[in-house]
Amino acid sequence: MVSRSAIAAIGLACFAVAAVPAALRTGMTRVDLPPPSIETGTVVVGKDGAILRAFPVADGRWRLKADLDRIDGRFQQMLIAYEDRRFFSHDGVDGRAVLRAAGQVLANGRVVSGASTLTMQLARLEGSIDTRGPSGKLRQMALARAIEAEAGKREILGRYLTLAPYGGNIEGVRAASLAWFGKEPVRLSAAEAALLVALPQSPEARRPDRDPAAAKAARGRVLERAVEAGLISSAEARVANAEPIPQRHDLPLHAVLLAARLATGKPAGAVVPTTIDSALQARLETLAKEAVARLGRDISAAILVADLKTGEISASVGTADPFDRRRDGYVDMTGRPRSPGSALKPLIYALGFDAGLAHPETLIEDRPASFAGYRPENFDHQFRGTVRVREALQLSLNVPAVKMLEAVGPSRLVAAMRRAGAAPQLSDLSPPGLAVGLGGIGITLRDLVAIHAALATGGRKVQLHEQAAPAFAPSEEIVSSRAAWQVMDVLAGAPTPGNVRGGRIAFKTGTSYGYRDAWAVGADGAHVIGVWVGRPDGAPMPGLIGLDAAAPILFDAFERLGRRVPLPDAPAGVREMTTASLPPALRRFGGPRARKDAADSPVIAYPPAGARVEIGSRLDALALKVRGGQAPFVWLADGVPIAAADLERQRLFVPPGDGFVTLTVIDAAGASARASVFIDHTR
């Protein structure tokens, strides 16, 4: 006996075949087409296009725009073979399918299969149509015809694959593939493709995580149809049918805090590109979680990786766990100002080398000293007497660093930080004091990476960025290439933490006052990596030391980065020297000298700073002249001594070639003057 629902279906089918074409032709203009665009979630992607983080649409559904060119071709063939064999030939309503469905009802007394085309299914989804009654079905057909009149087949298929339901709050094949298989639908196995074809028909009843048996049975029917259509072999279908039914995966969630910042204010459906290496990002996020698990429950960590050649941020780990409230995981510690401890010492010494105040082999005193009442001590409360500057930096001795900063000037240090791209925060509006050299200033992990990047690239600013490269601009010089290389060479010999491979990484650690922050920043020849460890709320953690807490993470990060690139060779003109072979004024650091007036300081009288000097041939000499200061004088060109100490106030110098050269003169008291000039040989 035929049921009442079957009789209604027969009547509807017959009516549709006989009357719908005419009705659609006359009534098409009265059909309200849905909006041309479908709301999809914003997606932040890595440099390779892989999703770092996707955001749901306003109602909490995971819906990502489908791109047919990035969806497995065999899946598309299976879908059409199973759902709508005449998709590319009908006009939205398949009359033959309607008659077939009616015949099945007559033969079986019940509905065996539907007659909805993919376009009709799209019409139902976009128009939110209830198709359980005749009026709803007619509206669905009319809307399908209207869609076909306005859009091409590829657009229709793409829109369907964006909206198709896949269970729960998952919509669209891209979100479904990520949720059920943990991967993009670019390349799917036969089993995966068949399951994605089967789910939209009954997305809740066939959900793999709720009823795996129903999901497997539905997948098997799709595989049978694929064999009949010649899309796969029987053997392949048997193998596919034996594959286990998957469970739900989390959608990609990397660079969570960076992605949230970049996505803010972007329109729905926007694709936000970044320079992040998605694979490296995942590895370093794992590293951060592993590290804090060893260090303590309240401790978090941040890691930042930058490419020295391009300035691209390759990885940005702002927190060890973005969902751990105990660790304030919602705080991006790559951008929070904190005290850097000793991590600024490399820039202090680079400025000192650049000014001709010292050389890595210069002797300097590490003894108790008072600077207008400021009495710095070393971390271990011990003093080592006379040491080389090289050792003072490698051992991070505080008194020598403050002596060097006193000679350089705290304001000059802060200005150099800003030129490098950092935004240091001072405690008040007064001029910076000597305490900034030991951490009395606020900087971010990104700031520290920018400063170290400048030193690692020959003293020039590296414009860090995590999105499209900024407009080209000449790179600003922070310190000379000689001074930058000397500092990096010193740091490459610093003692490494136990149980790590040192290699040739030029690195520096830092520990803030009260054990609140542990830092490590280092570079090889291609990348600079910065690490911060601590509590985001700033609470002290006794025993939290840069060398023990942050440095091991730094070296592990370099290992996970991949192949190590050697540090660059010394720039032209820099040669190995001993303390004894240095000019007398550079053999022992004297610091600033008290003078009666400015006339006692040396001044380069010729050539003046910024001058363009024309010289006849490459064998002709340039006369260098000094005014003021105390003889004997030592002249340097780009940090290389021109000759031994000289009592005369004039010295002949043969420039090696055209271009800028930095001239420095140092007097007997250790005071110096500097001028950068451009040399132009006329023949």
Image: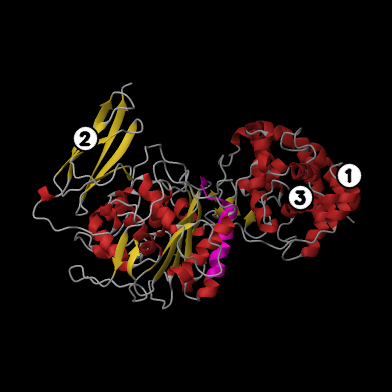
What amino acid type should be assigned to the residue bearing mark 3? Ala
Residue drawn 85% across the image and 47% down it: 225
- Residue 350 or residue 219, whichever sits in front: 350
Residue drawn 90% across the image and 50% down it: 235
Mark 1 or mark 3: name the one nearer the start of the chain. 3
Q: Which residue is mark 1?
A: 228
Q: Judge whether residue 272 is colored magenta.
A: yes
Mark 1 or mark 2: name the one nearer the start of the chain. 1
Question: In this view of the protein, can residue 378 be seen by the observer?
Answer: yes
Q: Which residue is mark 3?
A: 193
Which quadrant holds the N terminus?
A: bottom right
Kind of element beneath mark 3: helix
Mark 1 or 2: the one toward you: 2
What secondary structure do most residues of the magenta stretch adopt? helix
Between the C-alphas of marks 1 and 3, the distance is 16 Å
Kind of element beneath mark 2: loop
Which quadrant holds the C terminus?
A: top left
Q: Residue furthest top?
A: 683
Mark 1 or 3: the one toward you: 3
